[in-house]
Amino acid sequence: MHMRPGTGTLKLTTFRRRIDAFVHWANTEADRCGLTGETIPPDPLGNIGTARFRRSLAWHIARRPNGLVALAIQYGHLRTAISGAYASRGRGGIHELIDIETVRAVADTVADVHDDLQAGRGVSGPAARRAIKASATAPRFAGTVITATTAKRLLVNEDAIIYDNPHALLLCHYKRGTALCHRDGVKDAPSLDHCVPGCGNIVRTDRHAIQLRERANALDRAASHVPQPVGTRLRANADRLRAHADTHDRTRITLPEDAP
Ligand code: SF4
């Protein structure tokens, strides 16, 4: 069977047509309901095209590592290549936007770790002590306006950067030398979508332990509705997740009582 290349992805013209159709539909509905305040006004910069979504794209690349899979299908490569490819298609590059959004996401993650530790919650994993140190830098992020220059500077500071990896239910306190996930020549950032259990950069929090058990329970429920071989695999995965949660409970460390 002949497969048309690019099947499953939208072409730019289709994308633009759909946005125009959406604006037309929204305005017709707003008129029909007498909600003139909800009308989408004509855009002074012209029709909305893909180049106008650069910040949204950067946000998703930075905060939704699993979105990389969808983006990889759309653009053909992972993080670095995606931004490179997009840069050559849109107006100017989006590398700087990705750096800024990545640092914003990191700032949120570091602040969460800081707040959790202050509230008496614990962290575990080979990079737990490093993460405690990094969390002390949370106020630094809070007072910083993130520009392209500050983002670039912060991203090379391995001590300050903690990535959230909700898919693997862990935090990655990335250190190039100990990372187990490098692929496709990408060396300056973790490949969060290829996280390797046992990596020395892993940190887990009490929240992760809760989420691990919730995901394990969901897998057990799913296992009872599928054929036995698949069910056995799902239950084995559930056991593995519970083991991670148990390890966290056994090895978690907290801030000392007199910590600032
Ligand atoms: S393998 Fe290590 S460096 Fe890579 S994402 Fe996982 S924790 Fe981070």
Image (cartoon, rainbow, N blue to C red):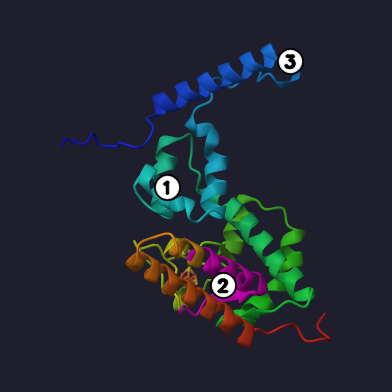
Q: Quadrant of residue 209?
A: bottom right
109 sits left or right of 202 in the view? right
Label 3 – label 1 distance at C-alpha:
36 Å
- Residue shown at 33% from the left, 68% from the top: 229
Q: Position of residue 29 (x, y in %)?
A: 64, 17
Q: Which residue is mark 1?
A: 70
Magenta residues, start to end: 198-219
Q: Earlier in the sequence, mark 3 or mark 2?
A: 3
Magenta span has 217? yes
Q: Position of residue 184 (x, y in %)?
A: 34, 61
Q: Which residue is mark 2?
A: 173
Q: Give the amino acid type for the residue marked by disc 2 in the picture.
A: His
Q: Position of residue 158 (x, y in %)?
A: 57, 71
Looking at the image, can residue 196 be seen?
A: no
Q: Indicate if the residue with disc 2 has its beta carbon within 8 Å of ligand 1.
A: yes
Q: Residue 32, which numbered label?
A: none
Q: Is residue 257 above or below residue 88?
A: below
